[in-house]
């Protein structure tokens, strides 16, 4: 078929579109070949979620082992080195390999569906992002399995991380693994930003974007900006370790604080990046169950962006005790206190949504509503840490450990599991059991609070973090035992979730397209969605297209049954970023092995760098070059190259 | 001096406040609990710790109140407004936005901002209050943190009165003391919670802090920046004494080790010089190592190995016999002394009072 570079897209109905074999255009071939080459965002999204949960379980087991060691004073279940690797891997796993990737998974799966589009803007980049994430995660875990895990905590302060104090290859696995993972985060983030700007359905202007997307957009924009800082830091560390450069070498004029600045300039925005999309899930789910639109869409969207902008200016609150000048402490203290304001906007918007709505208490609602409380607990403890003189006492005690777990479990894991209950019907076509789900929620909620609420007091009574054991007589004994018990109850709650998924995948009630009677576009297509998502690209006239008739805000109506057909090969609609007027037809790529091969080449390259086997690094480089060449080779079907003239 | 009177009034006010807060929050900060919780900072024992403690209680109470209010709002909202019609498996359920609800955001964020601003002002005032001591410090101490112990050097009285000790800091009560913090290896953090918040000890830079104890006593501290295998066993103690007792302690520390009299003690001394002297100093003998704690007045200290074990004859013997068993990974090697050798070493060491 001749490629038409200029044409007016046909508008047709769903019935007309059904005559065309869209599935033949979009489906991935079954079998191992299709599995390795697919660029379908739904497949990639699910893989992200499943992989992130596998890492969550690994990190959870590490946590339980640590809790055994800390259950009583002077327990010697693990050697100091083993314990140090456990807490380091626990942090690295949860923060880098679970918390962000699981949100990327939800966004990957949901964005084209909530945008009324057929795929992400860069489907192959999406596949690449997943493969690199998997490879980098395994890369770090291979080191751990060989006894060479990182042992300096997730923030890896120098000079303890330098070769003098840390011989062996644990730090090299971690450094190269983080640089590797940073590539995945960056390409994924670029993809999200462009997808947000360009591939929403026509009519979905910037003020009609589902609130969930604002969270991921903000997080992605931040990641594009801050990941280079941490990649650089780890690169410099690796150079110091392997080639005797002196970036962090005190004896040669290097600066330990340089590491802390580079790391926290990245890691504080990252902490917001791993909660903002999850907050978006809450903002998406609560209105469905409260039967009213979110209170304050615009303030909530703006506060999401504001949190991130202010979030770039608070990193020094991790360094209040490092002896920085008082003026700089005061400034960063002020900004760290002020950042609570946009968070308060979200909290009160959620409460108002409950109070002015009529909540239906379902399992996802329980998870979302409990997030509000857990968010506030994690938020106020963060506010306490922003107060410099208080932080001088709190920092590096278990109070911080309690705080970070309220933030990461409260505002990441709880909404994510709420999101699983909410979107599982869309992803699989079946409902999760509400009965088992209620058990799941209450066991998790009680276990979590039993484990982590007393931990605040453990911190206030002065227990430093990252100690592999503690003496009796400090007043920490009962609290630690309680935390250990709570941790196991929390783990039981997670097992109930897995059990529920296993049962419901086979026996769950059939969901139908819109089981929750929700308002956004993903619920207008079948569950699970077809390979092409939507038979026709809808044309949007309001923020909540499926509730338009009932809200009756405006006279105009979204057109879901009639829209752009786009069936000349893989195609979706590109719009203008702000007003969402149709702009061009995007030609979308076919499934491709290039992302997988590229990730494989990178893995070889990094393994070569790690082991100083330069031939392996060169082979990896050649594979990367080959895969990129294949990837970027201009294709007639994508309109990247005109058909050759005959004769 | 009127300044002292002001300070003591403020301290007693703080104590009353902390007692009241303790009851309110149910966390307890009564004096008897200080011993049960030697590392607690919910109660302060000095000018600086008091200011920090008041602010800590202040923001803690604000936080608890906020948690209670928000939790109540969420629970009440769900209970009062919920509809017991199950949702799920489709069907069209009414949707209603007759109430805008925006006033929740305006009021909630307005009140939050006011509280945040108030805290900000209090924070700045406290930072200003603790950034420097109220009077010129009477004692200057250099702390050299290293894996995994604290070297303590008293600098303020000139070279002739310079003493070096380890892990136990004696300070005069009621007088500010200045600390210079340096590290010879990795980052540590200097923290005695009842007296002051943390200051990191960072190689390549000298951090300065101060503290003041207002009550005679023994205050536990601990390294709080992760520093390697034995980070868990890097405690230190501040011993606050009356100025007179402090001075006599200092005078005593200036004295060298006593002359050995018996043959057994002489043999013990030789063994210590031979086996320990490369790392440890015992002034008055040839042992002059500088990378490990000064042992000249070893028995004047209450613990061994930076607070890991109590310092008595039995524990001391166990430590010398197998330091790697007690504190795995620490930089003191096993010496493989024979039984009689160990006995002579111990006999000599316990004369170092």
Image (cartoon, helix red, strand yellow):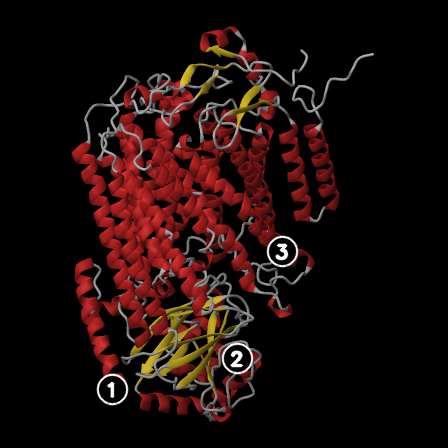
**Which image quadrant is residue A293 in?**
top left
Alpha carbon of mark 3 to alpha carbon of mark 2: how far?
37 Å
Instruction: List x then y, in percent, for residue A518.
Output: 33, 24
- Neighbor class of circle 3 (other Cα within 10 Å; few <14, some 14-19, many 20+) is some
Relative to A75, A595 lies left or right: right
Alpha carbon of mark 2 to alpha carbon of mark 1: how far?
47 Å
Residue at image mark 1 = B2
Give the quarter of the figure containing the C terminus of chain B.
bottom left
- Neighbor class of circle 1 (other Cα within 10 Å; few <14, some 14-19, many 20+) is few
Instruction: List x then y, in percent, for residue B99.
Output: 22, 33
> Any mark on residue B280, and which?
2
Relative to the observer, which residue lies in front, A490 or A318?
A318
> Any mark on residue A286, and which?
none
Q: Is residue A489 visible?
A: no
Q: Nearer the viewer, mark 1 or mark 3?
A: 1
Instruction: List x then y, in percent, for residue A332.
Output: 43, 60
Q: Specify the farthest residue to the right.
A: A647
Give the quarter of the figure containing the N terminus of chain B.
bottom left
Q: Nearer the viewer, mark 3 or mark 2?
A: 3
Q: Chain of mark 3?
A: A
Residue at image mark 3 = A236
Is label 3 in a helix, a strand or a loop? helix
Mark found first going from the N terminus, 2 or 1: 1
Q: Chain of mark 2?
A: B
Residue at image location 29% in from the left, 78% down from the top? B217
Residue at image location 35% in from the left, 16% down from the top? A510
Q: Nearer the viewer, mark 2 or mark 1?
A: 1
């Amino acid at each position: 078929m001749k490629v038409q570079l200029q044409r007016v897209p046909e508008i047709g109905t769903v019935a007309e579109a059904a005559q065309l074999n869209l599935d033949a255009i979009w489906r991935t071939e079954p079998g191992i070949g299709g599995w390795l080459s697919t660029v379908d965002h739904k497949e990639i999204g699910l893989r992200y979620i499943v992989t992130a949960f596998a890492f969550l379980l690994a990190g959870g087991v590490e946590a339980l082992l640590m809790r055994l060691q800390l259950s009583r004073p002077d327990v010697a279940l693990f050697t100091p080195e083993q314990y140090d690797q456990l807490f380091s891997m626990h942090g690295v796993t949860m923060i880098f390999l679970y918390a962000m990737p699981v949100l990327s998974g939800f966004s990957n799966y949901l964005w084209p569906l909530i945008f009324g589009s057929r795929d992400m803007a860069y489907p192959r980049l999406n596949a690449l992002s997943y493969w690199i994430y998997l490879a980098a995660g395994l890369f770090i875990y291979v080191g751990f399995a060989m006894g060479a895990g990182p042992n300096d905590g997730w923030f890896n302060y120098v000079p303890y991380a330098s070769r003098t104090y840390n011989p062996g290859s644990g730090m090299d696995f971690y450094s190269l693994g983080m640089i590797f993972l940073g590539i995945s985060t960056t390409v994924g983030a670029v993809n999200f930003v462009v997808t947000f700007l360009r591939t929403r359905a026509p009519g979905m202007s910037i003020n009609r974007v589902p609130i969930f997307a604002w969270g991921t957009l903000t997080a992605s924009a931040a990641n594009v900006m801050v990941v280079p800082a941490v990649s650089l830091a780890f690169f410099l560390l690796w150079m110091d370790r392997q080639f005797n450069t002196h970036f962090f070498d005190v004896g040669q004029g290097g600066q330990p604080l340089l590491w802390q600045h580079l790391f926290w300039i990245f890691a504080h925005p990252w902490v917001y990046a791993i909660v903002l999309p999850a907050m978006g899930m809450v903002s998406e789910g609560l209105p469905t169950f409260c039967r009213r639109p979110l209170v304050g869409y615009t303030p909530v969207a703006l506060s999401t962006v504001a949190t991130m902008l202010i979030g770039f200016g608070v990193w020094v609150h991790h360094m209040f005790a490092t002896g920085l000048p008082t003026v700089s402490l005061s400034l960063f203290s002020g900004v760290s206190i002020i950042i609570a304001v946009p968070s308060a906007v979200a909290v009160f918007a959620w409460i108002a949504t409950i109070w002015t709505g009529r909540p239906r208490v379902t399992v996802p609602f329980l998870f979302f509503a409990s997030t509000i409380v857990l968010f506030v607990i994690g938020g106020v403890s963060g506010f306490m840490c922003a107060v410099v003189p208080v932080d001088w006492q709190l920092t590096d005690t278990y109070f911080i450990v309690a705080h970070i777990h309220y933030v990461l479990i409260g505002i990441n894991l709880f909404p994510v599991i709420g999101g699983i209950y909410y979107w599982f019907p869309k992803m699989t076509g079946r409902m999760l059991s509400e009965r088992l789900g209620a058990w799941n929620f209450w066991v998790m909620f009680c276990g979590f609070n039993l484990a982590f609420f007393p931990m605040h007091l453990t911190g206030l009574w002065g227990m430093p973090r990252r100690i592999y054991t503690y003496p009796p007589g400090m007043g920490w004994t009962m609290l630690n035992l309680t935390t250990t018990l709570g941790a196991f109850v929390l783990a039981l709650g997670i097992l109930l979730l897995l059990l529920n998924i296993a049962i419901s995948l086979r026996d769950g009630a059939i969901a139908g397209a819109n089981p929750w009677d929700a308002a956004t576009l993903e619920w207008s297509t079948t569950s699970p969605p077809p390979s092409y998502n939507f038979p026709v690209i809808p044309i949007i006239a309001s923020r909540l297209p499926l509730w338009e008739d009932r809200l009756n805000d405006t006279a105009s109506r979204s057109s879901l049954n009639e829209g752009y057909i786009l069936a000349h090969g893989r195609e979706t609609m590109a719009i203008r970023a702000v007003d969402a007027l149709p702009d061009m037809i995007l030609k979308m790529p076919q499934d491709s092995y290039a992302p997988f091969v590229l990730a494989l080449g990178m893995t070889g390259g990094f393994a070569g760098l790690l082991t100083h086997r330069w031939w392996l690094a060169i082979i990896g480089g050649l594979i990367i070059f080959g895969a990129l060449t294949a990837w970027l080779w201009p294709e007639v079907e994508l309109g990247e190259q005109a058909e050759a003239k005959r004769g | 001096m009127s300044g002292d009177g002001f300070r003591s009034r403020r301290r007693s006010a703080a104590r009353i406040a902390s007692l009241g807060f303790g009851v309110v929050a149910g966390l307890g900060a009564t004096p008897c609990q200080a011993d049960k919780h030697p590392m607690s900072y919910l109660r302060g024992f000095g000018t600086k710790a008091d200011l920090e403690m008041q602010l800590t209680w202040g923001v803690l109470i604000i936080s608890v109140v906020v948690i209670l209010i928000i939790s109540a709002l969420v629970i009440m909202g769900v209970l009062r407004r919920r509809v017991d019609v199950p949702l799920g498996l489709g069907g069209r359920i009414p949707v209603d936005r007759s109430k805008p609800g925006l006033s929740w955001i305006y009021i909630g964020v307005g009140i939050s901002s006011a509280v945040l601003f108030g805290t900000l002002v209090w924070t700045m005032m406290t930072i200003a209050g603790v950034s420097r001591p109220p009077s010129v410090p009477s004692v200057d101490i250099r702390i050299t943190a290293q894996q995994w112990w604290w070297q303590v050097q008293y600098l303020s009285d000139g070279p002739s009165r310079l003493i070096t000790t380890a892990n136990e800091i004696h300070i005069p009560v009621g007088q500010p003391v200045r600390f210079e913090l340096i590290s010879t290896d990795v980052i540590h953090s200097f923290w005695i919670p009842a007296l002051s918040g943390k200051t990191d000890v960072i190689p390549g830079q000298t951090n300065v802090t101060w503290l003041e104890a207002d009550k005679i006593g023994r205050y536990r501290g601990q390294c709080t920046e992760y520093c390697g295998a034995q980070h868990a066993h890097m405690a230190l103690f501040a011993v606050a004494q009356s100025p007179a007792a402090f001075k006599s302690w200092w005078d005593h520390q200036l004295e060298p080790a006593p002359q050995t009299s018996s043959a057994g003690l002489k043999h013990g001394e030789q063994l210590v010089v031979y086996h320990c002297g490369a790392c440890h100093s015992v002034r008055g003998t040839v042992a002059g190592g500088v990378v490990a704690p000064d042992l000249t007045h070893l028995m004047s200290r209450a613990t061994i190995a930076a607070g890991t074990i109590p310092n008595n004859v039995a524990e001391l013997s166990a430590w010398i016999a197998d330091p790697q068993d007690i504190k795995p990974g620490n930089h003191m090697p096993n010496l493989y002394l024979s039984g009689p050798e160990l006995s002579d070493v111990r006999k000599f060491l316990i004369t170092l009072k």
